[in-house]
Image (cartoon, rainbow, N blue to C red):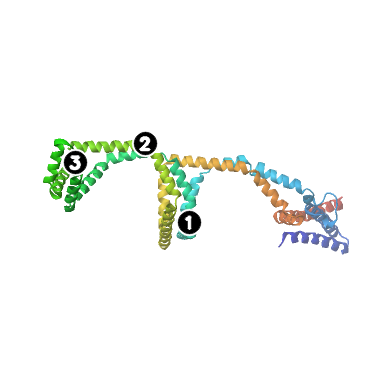
Amino acid sequence: MNTKNIAGISLAVMGAGFAATLALPDSIWTELAKGGFEAGLVGGFADWFAVTALFRHPMGIPIPHTSLLLRNRDKIVNALVSAMENELLNKESISAKLKKLQLLRLAATGATRLLARRDVRIALLDYAQKLIARTEPERLVPHIRPILASFVRQAELREPLARAADAVIDGRYDERAFDYLLNEAQNWVRKPGTQYLLGRLALDKLNEAQVGGFLGFAVQAFAGFMNEDKLGGLLQHMIVTALEDLGKDDNVYRHSIVMEIRERMHALADNEELHARWKAWAENAVAGETFERFAVGRLNEAKEWLIGWTETEKRNGGKAVFRAYRALRRFIDRDPAMIEAWESNLRDYATRLVEQNHYRIGRLVKENVDRMDDKTLVAMLERKVGKDLQWIRVNGALCGFVIGLVLTALQIAW
């Protein structure tokens, strides 16, 4: 039964009981009952008046010092806001509570529980797939271009080039590249057509040579005894032999050439002018249409691959999502100092956020209360505390009845 109805029934019982005693013949018991019901009626009515006066004017009559909540609405709201800000949810208590929390570990634990569920993993993959499908590579390129251009402008090439040169030398990749070139050169020189080409080029240069005197006579005589095949064969043999000698590790000339290559590689790391030209070329390339076509093509390929991958993973229950998360957790857990630093930064950020926005708690309460009209506010308060207040009325009627019995009994006995 509604408490409000119980309070009304208790008052009605007292009134009906008092009215009934008026019709009963005079006796001690009638006097006792009459005194009890009379006091209960007065007590219940007085408490009804007091409770009603908190929320509205009793019986609609503007009696002084009634409708207390509405008359003191601003005071009550301000007191509520002050209590929220300074006592219930003050900055110090919130900050102290935040400092005791392991926010990152709590988040990690929650994420582990969520990702352990198949439906959550599939939902994440489905959301990711839809997001990827809506992505337009043509719109991404204008955002990627300035990032790459800025990276190119700010890139420091000296140290990476020096490390690259050291790595090439340590792995003897320079010698391997040199041997590859020697091998390719030998293959080309040994071709049958190369012999004639070498002879033809050599004879042409001999005929063009402007040499006088005995030396000129000797050159012309030598050229007269040679043809393309003979001279080409001679040159072919000489070049092949020289290339074979350069391929041997103990060859002095090979050592000199390799050392020269290494010096040139190290010189690249210190050549600021060359670095500037490379940067300018790269920046122009990024700004050109060729790069845009290349980037759009690669992004479309990546988009199609990611859509296919997410579809496959959805059929597999999203196991890759959990594996990736677990690998990330293992990687992070290997460095407790890093975790503690992140925890500290996160707590500091949360504390600053509370300090900067704490005033919004009171403002939010006040704004919500101010949006309510008087009727709505009274109805809300009655729903929250009306039950207990109605019991005051019931208790007032019962206590008045008992006190009335006692007082009447004392009057009779006196």
Alpha carbon distance from label 3 to label 2: 29 Å
Alpha carbon distance from label 2 to label 1: 37 Å
Q: 244 left or right of 169? A: left
| Dot 3 or dot 2, earlier in sequence | 3
Amino acid identity at mark 2: Asn
Viewer-closest of 72 and 345: 345
Amino acid identity at mark 1: Glu
Residue 271's disc number? 2
Viewer-closest of 54 and 81: 81
- In the picture of the structure, the residue carrying the numbered disc 1 is 138
For residue 346, above or below residue 140: above
Disc 3 on helix, strand or loop?
helix
Residue 376 location (% of width, % of height): 74, 57
| Residue at the image point whose x is 48% and y is 39% from the top | 341
The picture quadrant where one finds residue 159 is top left
Q: 198 left or right of 328? A: left
Q: 107 left or right of 229? A: right
| Dot 3 or dot 1, earlier in sequence | 1
Residue 335's disc number? none
Alpha carbon distance from label 3 to label 1: 52 Å
- In the picture of the structure, the residue carrying the numbered disc 3 is 246
